[in-house]
Amino acid sequence: MRLFAIACDVVARPVYLCAARSPHVVDIRLFERGLHNEPKNLRDRLQEAIDEAPASAEAVVLGYGLCGGATAGIRARGVPVILPRAHDCITLFLGARERYMEEHARVSTYWYVSDQLERNDGYRAGAGGLAVGSDTDDQIEATRAEYVAKYGEDNADYLMEVLGGWRVHYGRAAFVSMGVSDESTSEAAARDEAERRGWAFERMEGSMVLLRKLIDGDWDDDMLTLRPGEQLAMSYDDGVVKAVPAG
């Protein structure tokens, strides 16, 4: 089988490794992580890539989760589209929805992974953090000044609370090790950042089980398959996403 894999670049190394070991022929296209800041733009870019899949592709596999609703509405047309039942990329790094929920319930966490540090696109490093949460202090102040100019003091304070609440609400920095490469430099950078922010630091072992299933064609209940003529929707339950007839 020939697969066309579309993935976020925060999973670049694991995706390439899984593709190298896959029993199938896998073509890969990566999108930069910064597209998450504009969900509609990300959705449009993904749909365009799906629609432009190579004619030889028998299925499209997405190295994405729901991603804040950014993937909701994407459609399968000529071939099936498969993706993990995941809230976001952190589920992909941890290897299971159940583990994601357990960690999410423990403490509010700012996540770091090696690929995001290596492919820094203007963010500091957090694969699961908010946009303002990844900026330097000077950039944060500049952002607030811009909000004041556009929306006024009260609205600016509200936006900074929503977008910049990481400074107060995050209690832990977690570096997820995928064991794909030498991660010592990335882990040290994450540890230093946690110390600067006053967060507890934890290193945890990741798992490629979901990405491996996705790229190996092992599409069990951990995966959602969109058949041609279906589109992705939020399921608002443990399944995270579901297939519905395209509108």
Image (tube, helix red, strand yellow):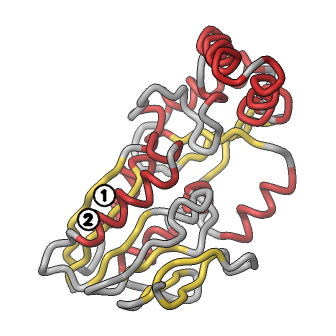
Q: Residue at x 41, y 30 (%)?
A: 121
Query: In the rendered structure, which amino acid carries the disc numbered 2?
Result: Ala
In the rendered image, residue 15, in percent from the top left (x then y), is placed at 36, 59
Q: Residue at x 53, y 42 (%)?
A: 37
90 lies left or right of 31: right
- Does residue 59 appear in the picture of this structure? yes
Q: Residue at x 77, y 63 (%)?
A: 101
The quadrant in which residue 242 appears is: bottom right
Q: Are there few (<14), some (14-19), or many (20+) residues within 10 Å of tag 1?
A: some
Pick the front one: 83 or 191: 83
2 lies left or right of 68: left
Q: Determine the residue located farthest toward the left in the rendered image.
A: 55
In the rendered image, residue 207, in percent from the top left (x then y), is placed at 56, 61
Cβ atoms under marks 1 and 2 closer than 8 Å: yes
User: Of helix, strand and loop, which one carries label 1?
Assistant: helix
In the rendered image, residue 94, in percent from the top left (x then y), is placed at 62, 59
Q: Determine the residue located farthest toward the top in the rendered image.
A: 138
User: Of helix, strand and loop, which one carries label 2?
Assistant: helix
Query: In the rendered structure, which amino acid carries the disc numbered 1?
Result: Tyr
The quadrant in which residue 98 appears is: bottom right
- Whether residue 152 is situated above or below residue 237 in the rendered picture: above
The quadrant in which residue 35 appears is: top left
| Residue picked out by circle 1 | 16
- Whether residue 66 is situated above or below residue 172 in the rendered picture: below
In the rendered image, residue 10, in percent from the top left (x then y), is placed at 45, 47
**Which of the numbered marks, if any, corresponds to residue 239?**
none
Q: Are there few (<14), some (14-19), or many (20+) residues within 10 Å of tag 2?
A: few
Please state the total of marks drawn on the protein image: 2
Q: Residue at x 50, y 91 (%)?
A: 245
Between the residue at mark 1 and the residue at mark 2, the CA separation in whole angstroms equals: 6 Å
**Which of the numbered marks, if any, corresponds to residue 20?**
2
